[in-house]
Amino acid sequence: MARVLTQPITYIEAPFTPVGVHTQLATGSTVQSITVPDGATKWMVQCQTQNVRFTLDGTAATTTKGFLLVKDGVPLVVACYPGQVIKWIEVTTTAVLDYIFGM
């Protein structure tokens, strides 16, 4: 059964306790995905150099489908749950995504 997120995407909230390590990667022109680790209830994310689109329900993001993460924007904190699959794709080549999970 799919879980419904009850919290909207928000700006950085306190407290934010990291779960795992900060990751930075080039996004690529194919869909990439990550699975939310045990203990995490938040995903802090920011993109650099180019825009990125992401989905939270496990469906594939495309250059026109998914939430738009604008380059050089402030980091966003997204509610999530362990085992949830987050997928993303760059809208334009050379996008870089920074993220860390937290609680």
Image (cartoon, rainbow, N blue to C red):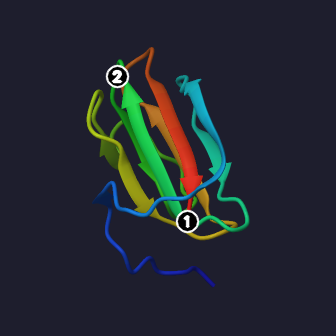
Quadrant of the frame with the C terminus: bottom right
| Mark 1 crowdedness (10 Å alpha carbons): few <14, some 14-19, many ≥20 | some
Which residue is at the front of the view, 9 or 33? 9
Residue 91: name its quadrant.
top left
Q: Amino acid at mark 2?
A: Gln
Judged left or right of residue 76, residue 56 is: right
Discs 1, 2 touching: Cβ within 8 Å: no
Residue 78: name its quadrant.
bottom left
Quadrant of the frame with the N terminus: bottom right
Percent coordinates x, y for residue 34 in the rendering? 65, 48
Which residue is at the front of the view, 85 or 80? 80
Instruction: Please report whichever mark, 1 or 2, sits nearer to the chain's N-terminal start.
Output: 2
Percent coordinates x, y for residue 92 in the rendering? 37, 21
The answer to whether one can see residue 70 in this image is: yes
Q: Which mark is residue 103?
A: 1
Which residue is at the front of the view, 18 or 63? 18
Judged left or right of residue 24, residue 44 is: left
Percent coordinates x, y for residue 33 in the rendering? 63, 45
Residue 23: name its quadrant.
top right
Q: Residue furthest right?
A: 38
Cα separation, mark 1 vs mark 2, equals: 27 Å
Q: Determine which residue is flagged by label 2.
A: 50
| Mark 2 crowdedness (10 Å alpha carbons): few <14, some 14-19, many ≥20 | some
Label 1: which secondary element: loop
Q: Is residue 102 above or below residue 68?
A: below
Label 2: which secondary element: loop
Q: Amino acid at mark 1?
A: Met
Q: Nearer the viewer, mark 1 or mark 2?
A: 1
Q: Residue at x 31, y 69 (%)?
A: 8
Q: Residue at x 49, y 60 (%)?
A: 56
